[in-house]
């Protein structure tokens, strides 16, 4: 279906797209939600009617143009309708993270000055009631699920369906006003405001226009040939920009159907029942599913296990090549077809990936084994790189050019440039308008020509033109000889080994890199059990010679892999030790979201870092630890330091120098 | 404190109705053992009524009398303004009294959904042939009942275990399934025999919330036995205290907490 017939101006807002979809795909499903054990569905025509009633109801309630309406709750069709209804009446939807606590919510509601809140259930309503004293602009709250709120004071509280009924009842009177407000929406109108979950400082409200969202949705939908009839499962937070692009942007542009799970706990079952054709998940979810599959296969009978292993080995060999359309011998293809029938097909069906045509993962680095596992099954899993300020897409991988260590080529319409210090900049139709009420941050992030700094360091591979992200720009440094030092890049490679839980790489301004390793007690403990190795504690297991030998082999494998990278070959690890304690947020070594605090660790374990560089074979150390109840204790240990083989390379200079 | 017929208003502002069920001078004997001795109290419409007491006080026997499992040796149970003749438990169930058990009594091999569906048995009238063929009336009935059951599943947030056999569930969830089955009968009075026994704090909090929600949402009158005093005092509107088969206290949680007999029964008293 081509959109060439539409004159510019006709489809410059989501209410306009909705009107078109109701006309063109009137009887096709637009939304489904599992409720009471059955998939309830709404066609585009029904959706348009629901949104119309709600929009009228909002006008009736006193929503003015330019008001902010906060939307809080899990993914439900009603809340998606709320966003478009808010747009239709000239208000700005502000979806919030439903797991935000009352305090975080208070900041955002106050910052955007929301006069209205649409909440999913009692839990969210309670949070807003708790903080409403301090919200001077807050006036009315609309809730979806009345459970538990029968006895609440309803002077400022309204049930969603009642608002719709009231709007519908007043339609003769209010429709002209709705028409008027809808007709003035254009590409410059604000589409949505999304708060970035700032790891540092307060969250910032990213203002995105209709142009940002619709152009991005159009470009990305064409890139992957999305069309009406595609199915997605909407389960990621509504406050996240990706969900807005997938579940509203692309859905309204192409007219595909958005399916909402019954509850977060039933997501996997619902995924299987829907069998989406377009799917997004962070690496964590793919990892969990793979682990579960492998554990279940361990418990399977020997014959089944043999068949599984045999065909999976074949899939790993030829699966990705077949998916990429490369030449594969007829014999291998035949065997792959047999495997599809015996193993891959049923497995994909179990995982809910039976119909996935396009799958994406993003957010953090995905382990190559995990990525290859899904691709070898014939699932077209790809990576993209993006951020809220770009309306998601900066780069993405085209079909047939997919690798686990790149994030693809610039998305259609996006220009990308690498600054001298390695930082990635982009400019695109999706580039955000501004940070709400924060011109200073806007200026810092977006320059006069529209280039936006991502804060990530990366480079384009000369041979393929694909972008590779190596680290946060502020973490990237130089070694003594001037070669590039990207600790997180190496740490991620180490952490892809199941035996390694955490790694901290040192080397800034030094002549070579060294590392602290934390073993994964579950994985290594499991191995010890199977090999009859007795141990009493993490410390004892971490110091076991066989464990050290295993870790050494992992480190050396990483070195070989790092050495293949011209720019990063200086980051090979020359010496390492396995720490005598697990890095812990209680001791301040990790953040609460389990990110390594490099500086604090380097200070705290200065003696160990020193030993890594002075060549001593072992070191005695004492470390203070904090127990969960707040008591302090001491751990004493003598650690063995090991040298790891490195691949010799000529020292590389950073191109910029 | 309260008018016998008109009901009262609770601390949190809920309107409690008139007397729904009344125990009048109930005595229960097993041979020479007197389990319950001359106890009278009432349960009002919309109320959460707790029965507490030390071990062996006769609480479960009392609940069994209400549910019709035991017939009192003396005295009578008045229900909706009339004395209730001796009945089989299923007849009592049909009159709108549902219960959960101290030791979970679910069908372990059946799914959660099927277990909750059994709670609807009293509402099904189709003949055995029709049911076996799943045709005609049986089919229409099952669809209608399934709808009600799904509402309860939604209410108690057990969608994710709908198709899981009960035997595979942890204890806390089994208790919730039992509550679901009792609710499926759409009772006027819900009897809960130690709904929190063996639960951890989080499970207790969940269960308390569900009990309050059931009372609030469906207006169900609830009579419960419970050992966790914190839970009882927080949840219930009025409390009956039993000891050695006798009633030693009756009133709001505050009144009961300050009742000397009750303190003695719980903490022991020097003789």
Image (cartoon, coloured by chain):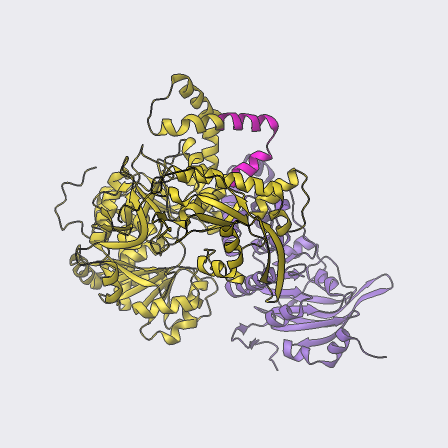
Chain colours: A yellow, B purple
In which quarter of the view is residue A255 placed? Answer: top left
Magenta region includes residue A24: no
Q: Determine whether B23 is above or below A612 in the image.
A: below
Q: Where is residue A208 in the image (x, y as percent from the top left)?
A: 25, 57
Left or right: residue A604 compared with residue A178: right
Q: Determine whether A75 is above or below A111 in the image.
A: above
Q: Main secondary structure of the magenta part?
A: helix
Residue B111 appears in the picture as rendered: no
Q: Quadrant of the C terminus of chain B?
A: bottom right
Residue A549 appears in the picture as rendered: yes
Q: Which of B107 and A347 is in front in this view?
A: A347
Left or right: residue A288 compared with residue A465: right
What span is colored magenta in the figure?
A291-312
Q: Where is residue A238 in the image (x, y as percent from the top left)?
A: 36, 54
Magenta region includes residue A304: yes
- Count every numbered label the image shows and give the total: 0
Q: Position of residue B185 (x, y in %)?
A: 58, 54
Which residue in the rendered view is the most extreme toward the right?
Answer: B32
Q: Nearer the viewer, residue A373 or B164?
A: A373
Q: Where is residue A224 in the image (x, y as percent from the top left)?
A: 28, 38
């Amino acid at each position: 279906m081509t959109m060439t017939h539409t004159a510019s101006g006709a489809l410059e807002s989501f209410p306009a797209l909705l009107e078109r979809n109701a006309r063109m795909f009137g009887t096709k499903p637009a939304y489904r939600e599992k409720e009471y054990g059955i998939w309830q569905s709404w066609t585009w025509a029904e959706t348009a009617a629901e949104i119309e009633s709600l929009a009228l109801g909002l006008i009736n309630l006193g929503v003015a143009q330019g008001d902010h309406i906060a939307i809080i709750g899990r993914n439900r069709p009603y809340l998606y309708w709320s966003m478009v209804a808010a747009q239709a009446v000239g208000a700005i939807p502000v979806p919030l993270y439903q797991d935000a606590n009352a305090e975080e919510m208070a900041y955002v509601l106050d910052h955007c000055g929301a006069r209205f809140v649409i909440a999913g259930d009692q839990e969210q309503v309670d949070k807003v009631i708790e903080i409403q004293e301090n919200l001077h602009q807050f006036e009315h709250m609309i809730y979806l699920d009345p459970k538990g709120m029968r006895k609440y004071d309803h002077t400022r509280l309204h049930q969603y369906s009642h608002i719709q009924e009231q709007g519908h009842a007043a339609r003769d009177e209010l429709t002209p006003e709705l028409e008027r407000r809808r007709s003035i929406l254009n590409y410059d109108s604000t589409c949505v405001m999304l708060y970035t979950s700032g790891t540092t400082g307060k969250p910032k409200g990213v203002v995105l226009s209709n142009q940002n969202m619709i152009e991005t949705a159009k470009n990305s939908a064409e890139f992957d040939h999305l069309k009406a009839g595609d199915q997605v499962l909407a389960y990621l937070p509504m406050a996240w920009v990706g969900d807005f692009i997938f579940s509203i942007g692309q859905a309204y542009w192409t007219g595909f159907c958005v399916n909402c799970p019954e509850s977060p706990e039933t997501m996997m079952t619902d995924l299987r029942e829907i069998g989406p054709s377009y799917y997004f998940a962070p690496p964590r979810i793919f990892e969990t599913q793979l682990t579960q599959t492998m554990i279940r296969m361990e418990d399977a009978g020997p014959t089944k296990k043999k068949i599984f292993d045999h065909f999976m080995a074949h899939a790993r060999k030829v699966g990705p090549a077949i998916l990429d359309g490369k030449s594969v011998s007829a014999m291998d293809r035949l065997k792959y077809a047999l495997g599809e029938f015996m193993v891959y097909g049923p497995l994909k069906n179990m995982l809910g990936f039976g119909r996935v045509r396009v799958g994406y993962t993003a957010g953090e680095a995905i382990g190559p084994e995990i990525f290859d596992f899904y691709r070898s099954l014939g699932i077209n899993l790809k990576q993209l790189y993006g951020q809220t300020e770009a309306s998601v897409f900066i780069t993405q991988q085209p079909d047939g050019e997919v690798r686990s260590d790149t994030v693809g080529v610039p998305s259609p319409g996006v220009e990308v440039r690498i600054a001298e210090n390695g930082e990635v900049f982009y400019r695109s139709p999706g580039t955000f308008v501004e940070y709400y009420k924060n011109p200073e941050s806007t200026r810092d992030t977006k320059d006069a020509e529209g280039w936006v700094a991502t804060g990530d360091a990366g480079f384009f591979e000369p041979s393929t033109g694909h972008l590779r992200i190596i680290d946060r720009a502020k973490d990237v440094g130089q070694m003594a000889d001037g070669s590039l030092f990207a600790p997180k890049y190496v740490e991620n490679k180490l952490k892809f080994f199941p035996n390694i839980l955490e790694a901290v790489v040192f080397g800034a301004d030094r002549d070579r890199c060294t590392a602290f390793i934390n073993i994964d007690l579950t994985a290594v403990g499991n191995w010890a059990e199977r090999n009859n190795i007795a141990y009493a504690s993490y410390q004892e297991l971490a110091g076991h010679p066989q464990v050290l030998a295993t870790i050494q082999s992992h480190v050396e494998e990483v070195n070989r892999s790092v050495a293949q990278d011209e720019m990063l070959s200086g980051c090979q690890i020359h010496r390492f030790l396995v720490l005598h304690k697990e890095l812990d947020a209680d001791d301040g070594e990790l953040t609460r979201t389990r990110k390594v605090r490099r500086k604090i660790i380097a200070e705290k374990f200065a003696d160990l870092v020193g030993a890594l560089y002075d060549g001593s074979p072992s070191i005695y150390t004492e470390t203070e630890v904090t127990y969960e109840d707040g008591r302090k204790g001491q751990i004493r240990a003598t650690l063995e330091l090991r040298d790891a083989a490195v691949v010799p390379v000529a020292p590389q200079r950073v191109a910029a120098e | 404190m309260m008018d016998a017929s008109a009901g009262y208003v609770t601390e949190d502002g809920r309107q409690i109705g008139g007397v729904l069920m009344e125990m009048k001078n109930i005595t229960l004997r097993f041979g020479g053992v007197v389990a319950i001795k001359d106890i009278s109290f009432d349960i009002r419409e919309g109320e959460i009524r707790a029965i507490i007491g030390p071990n062996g006080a006769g609480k479960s026997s009392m609940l069994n009398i209400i549910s019709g499992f035991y017939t009192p040796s003396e005295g009578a149970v008045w229900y909706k303004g009339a004395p209730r003749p001796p009945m089989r438990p299923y007849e009592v169930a049909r009159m709108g009294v549902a219960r959960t058990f101290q030791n979970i009594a679910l069908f372990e091999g059946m799914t959660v959904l099927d277990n909750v569906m059994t709670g609807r048995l009293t509402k099904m009238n189709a003949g055995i042939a029709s049911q076996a063929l799943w045709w005609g009336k049986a089919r229409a009935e099952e669809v209608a009942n399934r709808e009600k059951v799904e509402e309860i599943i939604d209410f108690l947030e057990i969608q994710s275990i709908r198709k899981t056999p009960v035997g595979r569930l942890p204890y806390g969830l089994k208790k919730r399934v039992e509550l679901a089955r009792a609710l499926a009968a759409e009772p006027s009075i819900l009897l809960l025999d130690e709904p929190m026994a063996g639960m951890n704090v989080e499970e207790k909090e969940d269960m308390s919330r569900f009990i309050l929600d059931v009372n609030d949402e469906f207006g169900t009158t609830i009579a419960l036995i419970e050992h966790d005093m914190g839970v009882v005092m927080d949840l219930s509107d009025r409390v009956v205290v039993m000891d050695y088969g006798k009633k030693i206290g009756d009133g709001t949680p505050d009144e009961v907490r300050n009742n000397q007999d009750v303190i003695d029964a719980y903490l022991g008293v020097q003789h």
